[in-house]
Amino acid sequence: MLKFDPRWRFSPPVDGLYRNGSIPAEVISDFDHLISRIATQRDRWNILEHFKGAFCRVTGRTHFRSSTESWAETDLSSVMNDAASNTPLFLEAFFDACEELREAGVGTPDVAMLNDICERHGIGYVIRPPDLVLKESGAAAPVDLARAPTLAERAVELLQDSLQRSERLLSDGRHREAVQETLWVLESVATAFRGVESAGDSVRGKYFNEIVRDLRRLMKGSTLDRVLDWVMALHGYLSSPTGGGIRHGLDLNSGIAVGPHEARLFCNLIRSYVSYLVAEHERLQGPRPGA
């Protein structure tokens, strides 16, 4: 049996960067297709009943054997759809059913195949037996990039894709690359401030450091000024070969390699800064036309 937070049995995590709450129809279809492949190895009716029993257990339904093989297929589809309203329970049922069959000598999909289905459909979990891991554990809240009125639609799509990619990289243990992705988003969002005006002055810089310096000059003494000070400190540390070594390579003699905990910290900090900068950009640009 997969192990996960017992609270998820009653209320699964809400959707964020991934689908965490429920299983969509196309994903149910993929798992149903796997069951059909498994069933070619033994009596098909019995295999269908085996999976039906597993899904009945997680949904709290009593398992009765169907009157015919055709009805077993229909009844299995029904209970799978019920279980799909809670993703952890659905994955637990399928995984446990496969493990029981494997012990009985039946070939079943391996964990990598199940995780691949979740990855392709944006399902927010990774099966790491005996644990079911939420990809977004410890993650900062999703960034609403679309709030800033001058962030073009294509730019929003590119930035959001990059944030999602960083989360997948963290889940895959590719820590340095994950921080690189979020750092790229931070630098990209900063460019949206180019041309912002205040008191007859404007942000004229072209590159990240120049833009931040101009913006701090315009917003001197404000909260934004203080936040940009922190942003510059983090950006400088991650850029330095003797710091995080993310942008300009790592000093192999005195650099500090980024581990999993540091990577999560840096990604969360950058996401928080990006979220704040998007909100500040919206404030400085004023209300949307027609708002």
Image (cartoon, helix red, strand yellow):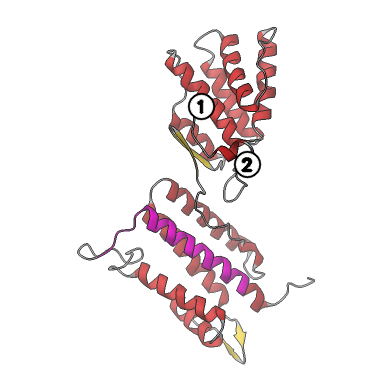
Q: Which element type, helix, strand or loop, lies under badge 2?
A: loop
Disc 2 residue type (three-letter): Gly
Residue under label 2: 21
Q: Secondary structure at mark 1?
A: helix
Q: Is 10 situated left or right of 140 in this image?
A: right
Q: What residue range appears in magenta?
A: 255-280
Q: Residue at x 66, y 33 (%)?
A: 25
Give the labeled residue for mark 1: 95
**Nearer to me, 118 or 85:** 85
Disc 1 marks a residue whose amino acid type is Phe
Q: How dense is the environment of label 1, judged by Cα within 10 Å: few (below 14), some, or many (20 and up)?
A: many
Please tell me in which quadrant of the rendered image residue 53 appears. Answer: top right
Q: Is any part of residue 206 visible from this angle?
A: no
Chief SS of the magenta region: helix
Q: Along the line of sight, which residue is nearer the eye, 280 or 151? A: 280
- Gap between marks 1 and 2, in whole Å? 18 Å
Name the residue at 53% across, 40% down: 5
Residue at figure coordinates x 54%, y 69% from the top left: 189
